[in-house]
Amino acid sequence: MKRPPLSYPEVSLTEFLRRNLSRLSEKNAIIYPAVITYGDFWARVDNLATSLAKMGVNKGDRVCLLEWSSPEFQVAFCSVVQAGAILVPVSPMSKEMEIEFIIKDTSAETVIVRDEFYPRIKNVLASAPSLKRIVVIGKNPPAALSFERLTLEQRANSTSPPIDAKQDLCVIPYTSGTTGSPKGVMLTHYNAVCNVIQSASAFQVRESDVALNVTPFCHIFGMTVGMLMSMSIGAEQVIMKEFHRKDFCQLIGKYGVTYSFLVPPMFIALVNYPDLVNYDWSSLRFAANGAAPISPDVARKFQELTGVTVYHQWGLTEASPVVAANPWEKIKIESQGIPLSDTEHKVIDPQTFHELPVGEVGELVVKGPQVMKGYWKRPDETEAAFVTIDGEKWLRTGDIARIDEEGFEYISDRLKEAIKYKGFSVSPNEIEKLLFTHPDVADCAVVGKPDSYAGEIPKAFIVPKSGVSVTSEDIVDFVKSRIAEYKWIREVEFVGDIPRTPSGKILRKALIEKERALRK
């Protein structure tokens, strides 16, 4: 099966999103937690974009955004992009050392931050010399600028610098990629516009829809198919700061929600909710799963309990992120679906790079207009992320898969080392670097352990220093105080040594196979 080709305008992301502004200015863009019309929304964007430009935010500058999913997140995102700057989303779960890394890696001069997270920014100021200005959402400290004032004060019409859609970046989300420490993924305006158009076509969403956006906007999945896609079609949005199953169920019926994008732990929580069948699900056309594979049994159970179709799709940050989705006319819940329009896929031998026949298992590679420009300031890792086949560049996904005779993908494993915890990519290398700073750790390794709820949990193998007495709780607490919750160690095993190659590289596969053997 193959989807029809689509047309993609070579314009800036905000110009694309604003195409229906005059017609929809009186329509509600957001109906919860606040009611905001499209006209009011873009007026706020114009005000903030103009203010940012006047205070010295120029085209190509990086602006970090540390905020929950909210109307303010959307205003800030669009304002930064409209000003020609590059938005760098930072998870609200990030701790100071993680925030410091991203600010320093991007040389960001501006941060927009929710007031409750301001102390974290303040504490990294001394070690982040590039940072010049802080805009605070909520109660602004004396040393910061007020987000509310900048967005609500009437200003002259905003002007945007000229944008080369295929070359200029609009957003740099951070991911662990295929290996190593977190990396900034360079997504152009064209990448984002293309994936929004591709996704809207695949999911068959429309202006009359009401979206319940519960996946975090700071994550590329929630950003693209939640926030940007909803905005692009002129749909109304219900926004949840955090997922709570009771609230989720109530909001569906209260606002007549027609679609929602979730991750596997949300589906698991819902099918185990005794009151699930007591809510009104009649408005919901589909609930889509993304960010990580979902158990077919969980998907079927949700469908049986609610009568709502579970729509499985798949992607990765390096592809903006959506690559494939099940077609409406034929859903195979065990499969990630077929490629989006103008997207191609192959399964190759990861050693020889030769394409494998239909049904054979190998590494999945993809290409399409949504594929990233590369990794920020990492040319070697950018080169390693692609493979040239018959003169064309293909993105290596790091996923082990097969493709059936109808073109459906079935992902079974990963070559890459990244751990997939509740849809978040976690870098083992990043956690290992932190563990090595613990005074009682001589050696360590971190792998993903299969988990029925989270998909995978980070498990640490620890070699303690001779003569010390360290407990699992010591290790867990040490990590908890220093990095975001989704990266926390969930299990610790003390061992005598870590398996390594002669060159010192961790034989992570051996540890992963050990974990899987224990589950059999």
Image: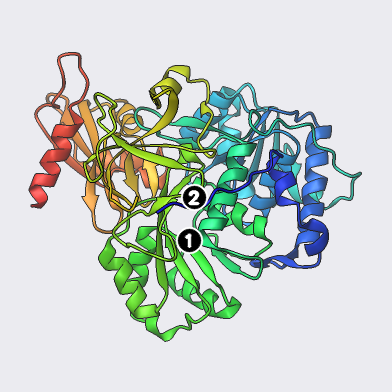
Q: Residue furthest top?
A: 503
The structure residue drawn at horizontal position 60% and vertical position 69%, both measured from the top left corner, is 210
Q: Position of residue 444 (x, y in %)?
A: 21, 29
Q: Is residue 148 above or below residue 296?
A: above
Q: Residues within 10 Å of mark 1 (few under 14, many from 20)?
A: many
The structure residue drawn at horizontal position 36% and vertical position 31%, both measured from the top left corner, is 430
- Whole-number angstrom distance, CA of label 1 to CA of label 2: 9 Å
Instruction: Compare residues 173 and 199 and report the one nearer the observer.
Output: 199
Q: Amino acid at mark 1?
A: Phe
Q: Position of residue 451 (x, y in %)?
A: 24, 53
Q: Say whether marks 1 and 2 touch (CB < 8 Å).
A: yes
Instruction: Compare residues 14 and 125 and report the one nearer the observer.
Output: 14
Q: Position of residue 263 (x, y in %)?
A: 40, 58
Is residue 136 toward the left or the right of residue 264 in the image? right
The structure residue drawn at horizontal position 13% and vertical position 46%, both measured from the top left corner, is 516
Q: Quadrant of the N terminus?
A: bottom left
Q: Is residue 242 above or below residue 513?
A: below
Q: Amino acid at mark 2?
A: Phe
Q: Is residue 127 above or below residue 248?
A: above
Instruction: Compare residues 494 and 20 and report the one nearer the observer.
Output: 20
Mark 2, residue position: 221
The structure residue drawn at horizontal position 24% and vertical position 58%, both measured from the top left corner, is 452
Q: Residues within 10 Å of mark 2 (few under 14, many from 20)?
A: many
Q: Is residue 416 above or below residue 226?
A: above
Mark 1, residue position: 261
Identify the disc placed on residue 157: none
Q: Residue furthest right?
A: 156
Secondary structure beneath label 2 = helix
